[in-house]
Image (cartoon, rainbow, N blue to C red):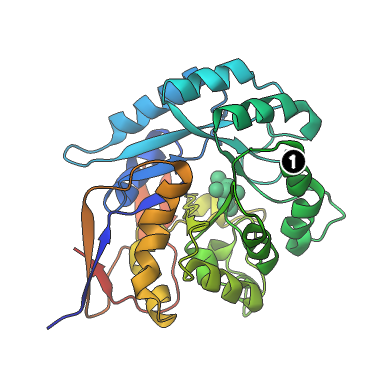
Amino acid sequence: MSETLTLRRPDDWHLHLRDGAMLAAVLPETARHFARAIIMPNLVPPVVRGVDAAAYRDRIMAALPEGMAFEPLMTLYLTEDTDSDDVAAAHARGLVKAVKLYPAGATTNSASGVANFDKVRGVLERMADIGLPLCVHGEVTDADIDIFDREAVFIDRVLDPIRQNTPGLRVVMEHITTSVAADYVRSASENLGATITTHHLVINRNHILAGGIKPHYYCLPVAKRETHRLALVAAATSGDSRFFLGTDSAPHTDANKLLPCGCAGCFTATNTVSILAEVFERADALDRLEAFTSLNGPAFYRLPVNADSITLTKGHPVSYPKKIATGDGNVTVFDPGFDLHWHVA
Ligand code: NCD
Ligand code: ZN
């Protein structure tokens, strides 16, 4: 008899869907396995106001193929000019599930992000009052801070002061990449969670840099040394409800990845579930996969868990496309570097 594993249908608590032709091509890759996703607002121009989020949600639903079910959980892009009344209204009508903080210049399309954190204090206090979570890209952008240290420095200089100054603010540290971040999340008794991506459970910085430069493994925050990858695997597979899946699946065309100054992002929507099953099996923690993919995230966001489930069956190596064709060009699917054996029915 073949081995099977049934999971409550997963959600993705950090996803980039883009817009237009790219949206149409990548949305089915997520909707095939995931019921819901927190949709990142870093479009050009960014999704700043409630009306922008409503319009983007409509474009996502219009791009969803017939017969597929998917619920986009919308976010607003925090700027120094964000209007707290607009945020509160979008939350009150159930449209928006989080606000995203990008330090200005930290990553793809973050130019409109926050440079002076004092300027968003009023919005953050309002969010604390109404219980609306803040999703944080946790990296400082100072040129004099080594890129491998930017997450740890952000915790000391920005995140911890924000949390101390805004009691009750619920924060998700997005795509954590270090043991420092995992320990910081564990040190908080409440109001702090973290997403962990699929690719950061698989690659370390050698995958990007050793034996030739591999642009398809380049993302932000950049993957760190192996000890940090192991710390992320330990956190994800621990069952600790503060850690949950946010794939950060971030499609860029090959043309935009393979450049002298290539874009940051790994596209993992297509094979994430099979990769995670492999990672959790290797950690002898398959019984905790469902908590990571399907239970801990809804608990943090105070949403019901999904009613239906998916079934994985172990067998011969899974075949999946190496590239997804989009109207803008091909997007390369993340290559974990090992065979996958868990097929999603
Ligand atoms: C993301 C993107 O391409 O939008 N890139 C990435 O490397 N993760 C932005 C982000 O989440 O940092
Ligand atoms: Zn992201």
Residue 60 x %, y %: 35, 32
* Left or right relative to 273: residue 245: right
* Left or right relative to 206: residue 306: left
- Does any portion of residue 270 appear in the rendered image? yes
Where 264 falls versus 50 (above or below)? below
Q: Check mark 1 vs ligand 1: CB closer than 8 Å? yes or no.
A: no
Q: Residue at x 74, y 53 (%)?
A: 155
The quadrant in which residue 58 appears is top left
Q: Nearer the viewer, residue 107 or 301?
A: 301
Reading the image, the residue beneath label 1 is 162
Residue 88 x %, y %: 55, 21
Residue at the left extreme of this rendering: 1
Q: Residue at x 77, y 37 (%)?
A: 165
Q: Residue at x 30, y 34 (%)?
A: 63
Where 102 falls versus 29 (above or below)? above
Where 130 falls versus 7 (above or below)? above
The quadrant in which residue 315 appears is bottom left
Q: Residues within 10 Å of mark 1 (few under 14, many from 20)?
A: some
The quadrant in which residue 271 appears is bottom left
Quarter that holds the N terminus: bottom left
SS label for mark 1: helix
Residue 228 x %, y %: 64, 72
* Left or right relative to 220: residue 297: left
Q: Nearer the viewer, residue 327 or 87?
A: 87
Q: Amino acid at mark 1?
A: Ile
Residue at the front extreme of this rendering: 189
